[in-house]
Amino acid sequence: MPSRLAKKPIQVPAKITVTAADGVLSVKGAKETLSKTYHSSISIEVTPEGVVILPKNSSKLAHALTGTFAAHLNSMILGVETPFKKALILKGVGYKVELKGRDLVFNVGFSHQVTLTVPEGLTATVEKGVIRIEGADKQRVGQFAAEVRQVKPPEPYLGKGIAYEGEVIRRKQGKKSV
């Protein structure tokens, strides 16, 4: 039984072309082109009604992958239309970040600077302690945002560190005096 996502054909907007050949799924938009290899136990057919994802056999894996690739295809279509965005906020006295070419340089309370290179296909902007990451590939945007957050995760006592915009930091109470 294929997943609920894969039962219906996935609609493709007129400005976007989808091709599936030799185990590679490609989505081409006005500015971006995304490609992803897919498993041999599923078949992807591009029809005028939309893109149909079907299992080649009746294994549990094939049925699970139909839904997975339907979700991946939806994300790829959304990504080439409008880029995915993540924002991170720098909290802490003296914490700074600046963009030098394709490198993010962090001063976040260590004895040294931490440098992260922005991957190809992504753009990063920095303004007043807010880091914005944009890109067509949802997975890569989220992965790089997680790497940036990992430089200095928010700590529970003062809330200092790098946090996602809108993230609720679970706070702890400090020492109690007698």
Image (cartoon, rainbow, N blue to C red):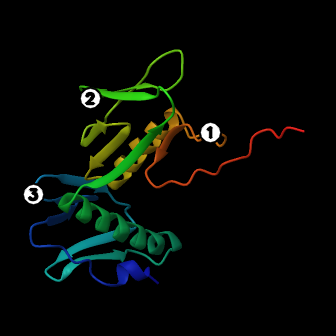
Q: Nearer the viewer, mark 2 or mark 3?
A: 2
Disc number lying in front (2 or 1): 1
Q: Are marks 2 and 3 in contact (CB under 8 Å)?
A: no
Return the disc, 1 or 3, that comes first in the chain's sequence.
3
Q: Residue furthest top?
A: 111
Q: Looking at the picture, how far across and down is residue 133, in whole percent?
A: 32, 45
Residue placed under numbered mark 3 in the picture: 30
- Residue closer to the observer: 84 or 56: 84
Q: Label 2 amino acid?
A: Arg
Q: Amino acid at mark 3?
A: Ala
Residue 67 position by quadrant: bottom left
Which quarter of the figure has residue 117?
Answer: top left
What whole-number distance in Å separates the C-alpha atoms at marks 2 and 3? 24 Å
Q: In the picture, which quadrant includes the C terminus?
A: top right
Q: Earlier in the sequence, mark 2 or mark 1?
A: 2
Residue 105 lies left or right of residue 60; in this view the side is left
What separation in Å lies between label 2 and label 1 (alpha carbons)?
Answer: 31 Å
Q: Position of residue 64 (x, y in %)?
A: 47, 71
Within 10 angstroms of label 1, few (less than 14), some, or many (20 or more) residues? some
Q: Residue at x 38, y 37 (%)?
A: 129
Kindly identify which residue carries mark 1. 158
Amino acid type at image mark 1? Leu
Specify few, some or many for label 2: CA neighbours under 10 Å numbering under 14, 14-19, or 20 or more: some
Q: Position of residue 160 (x, y in %)?
A: 56, 37
Which element type, helix, strand or loop, lies under badge 1? Answer: loop
What is the secondary structure assignment of the residue under circle 3? loop
Q: Which residue is depicted at the point 25% across and 41% down?
A: 123
Residue linked to disc 2: 102
Q: In the shown orientation, is residue 76 left or right of residue 176?
A: left
| Vertical relation: 175 (above or below) 115 | below
